[in-house]
Image: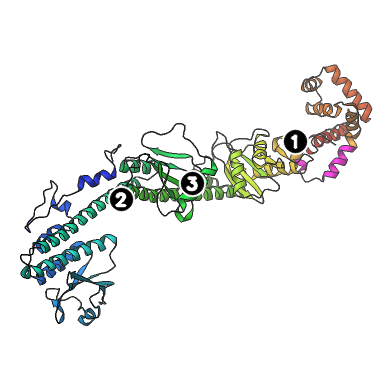
């Protein structure tokens, strides 16, 4: 296929027109450099010359009957001539053919109609008519009814036969009637011109079908379809999604940047086009919707600011739209299959599956399980774990890393991702998308192989539950940060935890609240640094002497001996509960 069209579809019509001039002889010749077989694929032009030179009506009918099979999968069962006594069968049909019921032919009453024959799905009596009325019949059968093209060809043959029979009938009686002869020749020329028009139309339709068939054979694709449409019409072709975003463009004058219409205008335009059966003109464009099974998947259009498009352009656009609809439906089905396979894979990984099988299945869906992964569990009260929520989670966790595996479990969305979420970045993104911060996220430790996924899933669930059982229930909790709660677990009653914190830190918390100090935070950092003065002072960004002073005040206010092992353990657990579960508040 050429990369740039040399002409529009409409130009082919004029190139292929065959000019005919009426002649006073039946041997009029047509001058055309192309082979006659290309100009007259069904032989009707050649037949017409012979028909109009015949003097006998019976011979004309026999010639027409013999030509029926050249028009398609049809068979001439019988021929009749109208006489003063009724219908007279024309001899010459196949001896072994099923016999047409002559009585049934008389019942037609000079009208066209169906005739019943054994082993024939379709049999039709075509009336041959002239100025004086019925001249005869040709009975044609087939294993199925003719399509639009077949009906046209059979009707053309009947018309030519009728004209030839009329001429043969009038020749003896009106040999000198030049006006009648001219009229009959005009009818012939009209029929021939119609045949030429039909031939040109069929040629153009064949060109469109072949071009789009080549696109499908090479794998299709939106770019290939728009390029083919551009080459067929000479007009720039484009594909948009339903929101007006450009997906593909072929041809000159592509806008940069591409203008995206407002949602209001786009919806109004789509409704307008959807009301029509075929392509619709909207301003400088001809637009067709790709909506297989009623689902709008895309918009196909051609730019036609000079309004040069004709019926052949519309035909090409309509057929390109059908190819695009099939392509987009195929892409959707592939996406749905891939999504289902990816969900099945992560579901099996969470439960535990064969490692070799897991690697093979992951490779089949384009996911590399050889890399380090993390399990992330997301729960947002008030938002059902449906497709919309799943898409929001997938978008919020999108990074430069590979696309995560994602599934839904018990009102939660679970991801297996290469990228470890950055602090509260995912939570903040989801809070913005969903319009509420009241959600929690649990993140596991790193997972280096498929057999570690079930363990990491339990870690992510524990981190999520710790967050949801804490006073600060929204936010992100990493299993790495749970410390002692990796062992203790998240199922403790919140009131018991508050009572434990109050017992061991209540006096210090009250003192901090009343004097705007940070004694509890100081004690927590001191324990986190393993009782090292220098590290704790650096972590608190205070002088070493300030740290000593605060620790002395802690001993005095709490009346606790910081050198006692059990006391230190309880105080350290209390500070962890205060910070992780209670969010640093009492």
Disc 1 crowd, CA 10 A, few/some/many (<14, 14-19, 20+): few
Q: Mark 1 falls on what kind of element?
A: loop
Q: Mark 2 falls on what kind of element?
A: helix
Disc 3 crowd, CA 10 A, few/some/many (<14, 14-19, 20+): few
Q: Main secondary structure of the magenta part?
A: helix
- Residue beneath label 1, please? 483
Q: Earlier in the sequence, mark 1 or mark 2?
A: 2
Magenta segment: 487-502
Residue at image point 88% right, 24% down: 551
Viewer-nearest of discs 3 and 1:
3
- Residue 269's tag is 3
Is 131 situated left or right of 318 in this image?
Answer: left
| Viewer-side residue, 122 vs 186 | 186
Q: Please state the horizontal and vertical placement of residue 356, each as a whole percent of the image.
A: 52, 45
Is 489 situated left or right of 414 in this image?
Answer: right
How was this image coloured? rainbow
């Amino acid at each position: 296929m050429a990369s740039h069209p040399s002409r529009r579809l409409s130009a082919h019509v004029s190139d292929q027109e065959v000019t005919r001039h009426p002649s006073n002889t039946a041997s009029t010749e047509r001058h055309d450099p192309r082979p006659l077989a290309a100009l007259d694929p069904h032989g009707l032009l050649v037949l017409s010359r012979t028909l109009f030179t015949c003097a006998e009506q019976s011979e004309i009918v026999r010639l027409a009957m013999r030509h029926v099979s050249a028009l398609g999968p049809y068979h001439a069962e019988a021929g009749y001539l109208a006489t003063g006594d009724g219908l007279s069968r024309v001899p010459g049909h196949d001896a072994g053919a099923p016999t047409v019921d002559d009585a049934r032919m008389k019942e037609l009453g000079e009208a066209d109609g169906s005739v019943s024959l054994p082993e024939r799905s379709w049999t039709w009596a075509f009336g041959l008519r002239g100025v004086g009325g019925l001249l005869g019949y040709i009975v044609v059968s087939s294993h199925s009814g003719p399509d639009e093209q077949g009906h046209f060809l059979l009707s053309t043959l009947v018309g030519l036969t009728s004209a030839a029979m009329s001429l043969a009938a009038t020749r003896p009686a009106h040999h000198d009637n030049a006006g009648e002869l001219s009229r009959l020749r005009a009818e012939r020329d009209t029929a021939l011109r119609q045949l030429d028009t039909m031939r040109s139309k069929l040629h153009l339709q064949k060109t469109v079908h072949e071009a789009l068939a080549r696109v499908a054979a090479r794998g299709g694709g939106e770019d290939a379809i728009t390029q083919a449409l551009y080459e067929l019409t000479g007009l720039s072709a484009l594909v948009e999604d339903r929101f007006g975003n450009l997906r593909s463009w072929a041809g000159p004058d592509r806008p940069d940047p591409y203008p995206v219409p407002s949602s209001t205008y786009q919806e109004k335009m789509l409704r307008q086009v959807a009301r029509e059966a075929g392509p619709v003109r909207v301003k400088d464009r001809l637009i067709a919707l790709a909506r297989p099974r009623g689902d709008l998947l895309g918009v196909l259009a051609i730019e036609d600011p000079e309004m040069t498009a004709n019926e052949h352009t519309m035909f090409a656009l309509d057929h390109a739209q059908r190819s695009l609809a099939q392509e987009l439906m195929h892409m959707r089905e592939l996406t749905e299959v891939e999504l289902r396979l990816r969900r099945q894979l992560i579901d099996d990984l969470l439960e535990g599956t064969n490692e070799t099988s897991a690697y093979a299945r992951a490779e089949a869906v384009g996911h590399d399980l050889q890399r380090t992964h993390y399990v992330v569990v997301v729960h947002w009260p008030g938002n059902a774990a449906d497709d919309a929520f799943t898409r929001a989670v997938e978008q919020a966790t999108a990074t430069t890393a590979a696309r995560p595996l994602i599934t839904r479990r018990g009102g939660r969305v679970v991801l297996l991702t290469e990228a470890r979420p950055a602090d509260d970045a995912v939570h903040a993104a989801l809070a913005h998308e969903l319009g509420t911060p009241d959600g929690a996220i649990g993140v596991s430790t790193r997972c280096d192989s498929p057999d570690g996924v079930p363990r990491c899933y339990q870690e992510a669930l524990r981190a999520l539950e710790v967050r949801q059982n804490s006073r600060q229930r929204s936010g992100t909790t990493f299993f790495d940060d749970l410390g002692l709660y990796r062992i203790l677990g998240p199922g403790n009653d919140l009131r018991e935890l508050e009572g434990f914190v109050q017992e061991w830190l209540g006096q210090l918390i009250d003192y901090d609240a009343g004097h705007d100090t940070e004694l509890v935070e100081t004690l927590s950092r001191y324990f986190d640094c393993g009782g090292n003065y220098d590290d704790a002072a650096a972590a608190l960004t205070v002088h070493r002497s300030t740290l000593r002073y605060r620790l002395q005040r802690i001993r005095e206010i709490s009346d606790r001996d910081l050198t006692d092992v059990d006391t230190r353990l309880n105080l350290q657990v209390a500070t962890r509960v205060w910070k992780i579960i209670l969010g640093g508040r009492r």
